[in-house]
Image: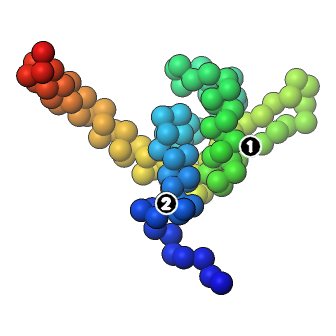
Amino acid sequence: MTAAWPDVYRADCPSRVILEHVTSRWGVLVLIALLDRSYRFSELRRHIGGVSEKMLAQTLQALERDGFVHRAAQPVIPPRVDYSLTPLGVEAATHVRSITEWVESKVPDVQDARLQYDAVRT
């Protein structure tokens, strides 16, 4: 039996989990940060404001498992672990960066829309 072709609208489609990892708040920020350069865990946590250690670790692990992030542990004391993007990760991060740049450029428009929406409903 062969697997059905991926279809994000199908409830059991594996693309949904991948989409969740790539488009989650922390997934997006990790991907676009690593697009610029590799980071150590603590550097990445400082760079991405507001992410907890637990959430960053879970996000990195999910992205690593999906093949987007490479984790390189150096056998030194103290231990050093560097995170970078795989070729698949670079491809995903490039797409994600485009949407984040678009979102950033539309913040004033969205804020205006929210004000108009709220004005009608209060």
Residue 61 at x, y percent in the picture: 70, 41
Q: According to the image, what is the colour scheme of the structure?
A: rainbow
> Against 103, is 112 above or below?
above
Q: Position of residue 67 (x, y in %)?
A: 65, 55
The answer, for residue 8, to whether it is visible in the render is yes
Q: Quadrant of residue 120?
A: top left
Q: Alpha-carbon neighbours of circle 2 within 10 Å: few (<14), some, or many (≥20)?
A: few
Q: Mark 2 points at which residue?
A: 11
Q: Is residue 38 visible?
A: no
The quadrant in which the C terminus is found is top left
Residue type pointed to by label 1? Arg
Amino acid type for the residue under numbered disc 2: Ala
Kind of element beneath mark 2: loop
Give percent across and percent down for residue 34: 57, 39
**Left or right placement of residue 17 versus residue 58 in this view:** left
Real-space Cα separation, disc 1 to disc 2, in angstroms: 31 Å
Residue 56, horizontal then vertical, whole percent: 63, 30
Question: 20 or 94: which is nearer to us?
Answer: 20
Q: Mark 1 points at which residue?
A: 71
Residue sitting at x 48%, y 34%: 25
Q: Is mark 1 on a helix, strand or loop?
A: strand
Q: Quadrant of the N terminus?
A: bottom right
Q: Looking at this view, is 3 or 80 the one in front?
A: 3
Residue that extends furthest to the top in the rendered view of this protein: 122
